[in-house]
């Protein structure tokens, strides 16, 4: 059921109260204009959450990339969490997860024709992507839309569409602020979202549950609510071998489930019906695998009975690929389990039209046409000088 992964540390609630006041003060400074949010003359879509841990940001950003890249020049800008470089960087063919972070590396591997950049300072990163296009895209080309990964709390940028992701198993309406719970900011922060997506929904979600969650989320009329689920694709070998359907796993196969993500519990639940022989080997989110970790993986897999294989996530595969020390046995049995996003309630077309319509309406070409039309209108009617602002909120 919804919220079934939530655990509140009641004894830490006084510290959550103190933390909450600090976050409220910061948001208030942005709301009254003491701290400034900067708008840009390019479509910007932010995807993020107000909780610590995985809500499915990367697969949702990848969904947007897949939706937009056929008709627009897309750039993804991420912080590049736990990378070993600093400042603005563009993902190149020879870069590694250590250079740009595991999630940007994963996206660049999937979409080599898409610009993937990292910068802790998002305003600086956007400026680099928009003001030096020839160095990034080639002469005569430009960025049409920028996707900000994990930027809901990064209020120095004012996105055109702000997408808030909420994990079905950790609904924010039932959670508490850090450190007692996992909320990064008070529940009132959801008012900044243009779109709210309840992610990781079970496929068998009943209509009554949709209605209960919709009412409980208590959104404003301008906010759109969607529901998505994660769909597993075929197992893909990382080093050698052939892909295989997930349902091809047999009851007698032993699986080493290797994860370094925020919420591995759902993956364990989903694989359990396929085989009862699952050995979890769990590390912290964005874990950088050390030589000792690699040796532990080798030893754990060697001790498991056959037939056997290793299943890991795309994010972990980005950090594991190229690591020295993996045994030949591990390399021959190491598979990644890709996931994709699927909208529920027949909401996909509505969501797609919302996103594509916003990008087309606010593209630089459209803005130039509007500016020319305004200029002609002023000349013909002698209406004098009037200020003009461009709104990026998709109403």
Image (cartoon, rainbow, N blue to C red):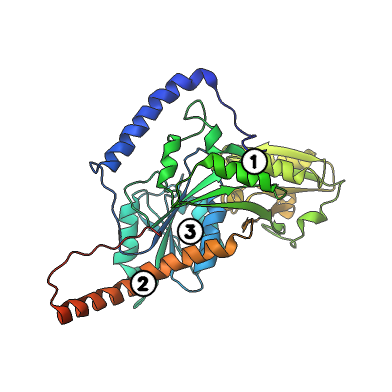
In what element is the residue under mark 1?
Answer: loop
Closer to the camera, 255 or 267? 267
Closer to the camera, 18 or 118? 18
- Label 3 neighbourhood size at 10 Å, few (<14), some (14-19), many (20+)? few
**Residue 215 quadrant:** top right
- Label 2 neighbourhood size at 10 Å, few (<14), some (14-19), many (20+)? many
Closer to the camera, 252 or 3? 3
Image quarter of the C terminus:
bottom left
Which percent across, then down, holds residue 255? 77, 45
List the residue tagged with mark 3. 95
Can residue 54 be seen?
Answer: no
Earlier sequence position, callout 1 versus callout 3: 3
Residue 169 shown left or right of residue 176 in the figure: right
Q: Residue furthest right?
A: 252
List the residue tagged with mark 2. 142
**Residue 263 quadrant:** top right
In what element is the residue under mark 3?
Answer: loop
**Residue 283 quadrant:** top right
Image quarter of the N terminus:
top right
> Residue drawn at (50%, 29%), measured in percent from left and top?
176
From what the image shows, is residue 89 above or below residue 292? below
Give how far apart the Cα atoms at labels 3 and 2 are. Answer: 23 Å
Q: Residue furthest top?
A: 11
Which percent across, then down, holds residue 107? 53, 59
Can residue 215 be seen?
Answer: yes
> Residue drawn at (34%, 77%), measured in percent from left and top?
139
């Amino acid at each position: 059921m919804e919220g079934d992964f939530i655990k509140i540390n009641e004894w830490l609630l006084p510290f959550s109260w103190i933390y909450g006041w600090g976050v409220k003060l910061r948001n208030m400074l942005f709301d009254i204009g003491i701290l400034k949010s900067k708008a840009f003359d390019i479509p910007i879509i932010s995807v993020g959450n107000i909780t610590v841990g995985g809500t499915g940001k990367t697969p949702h950003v990848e969904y947007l990339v897949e939706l937009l890249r056929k008709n627009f020049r897309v750039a993804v800008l991420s912080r590049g969490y736990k990378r070993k470089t600093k400042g603005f960087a563009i993902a190149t063919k020879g870069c590694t997860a250590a250079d740009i972070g595991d999630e940007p590396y994963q996206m660049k591997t999937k979409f080599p024709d898409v610009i993937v950049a990292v910068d802790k300072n998002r305003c600086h990163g956007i400026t680099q992507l928009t003001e030096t296009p020839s160095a990034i895209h080639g002469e005569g080309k430009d960025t049409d839309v920028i996707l900000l990964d994990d930027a809901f709390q990064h209020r120095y940028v004012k996105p055109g569409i702000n997408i808030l992701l909420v994990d079905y198993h950790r609904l924010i309406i039932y959670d508490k602020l850090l450190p007692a719970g996992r909320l990064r900011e008070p529940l009132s922060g959801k008012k900044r979202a243009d779109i709210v997506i309840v992610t990781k929904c079970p496929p068998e979600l009943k209509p009554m549950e949709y209605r209960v969650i919709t009412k409980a989320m208590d959104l404003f009329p301008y906010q759109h609510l969607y529901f998505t689920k994660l769909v597993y694709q075929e197992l893909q070998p990382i080093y050698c071998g052939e892909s295989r359907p997930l349902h091809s796993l047999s009851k007698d196969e032993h699986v080493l489930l290797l994860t370094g993500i925020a919420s591995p519990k759902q993956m364990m639940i989903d694989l359990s019906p396929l085989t009862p022989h699952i050995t979890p080997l769990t590390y912290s989110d964005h874990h950088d695998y050390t030589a000792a970790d690699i040796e532990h993986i080798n030893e754990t897999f060697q001790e498991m009975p056959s037939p056997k294989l290793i299943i890991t996530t795309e994010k972990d595969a980005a950090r594991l690929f190229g690591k020295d020390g993996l045994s030949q046995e591990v390399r021959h049995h190491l598979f990644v389990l890709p996931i994709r996003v699927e909208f529920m309630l027949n909401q996909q077309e509505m969501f797609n039209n919302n996103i594509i319509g916003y990008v087309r309406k606010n593209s630089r070409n459209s803005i130039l046409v509007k500016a020319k039309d305004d200029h002609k209108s002023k000349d013909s009617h002698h209406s004098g000088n009037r200020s003009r602002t461009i709104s990026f909120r998709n109403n």
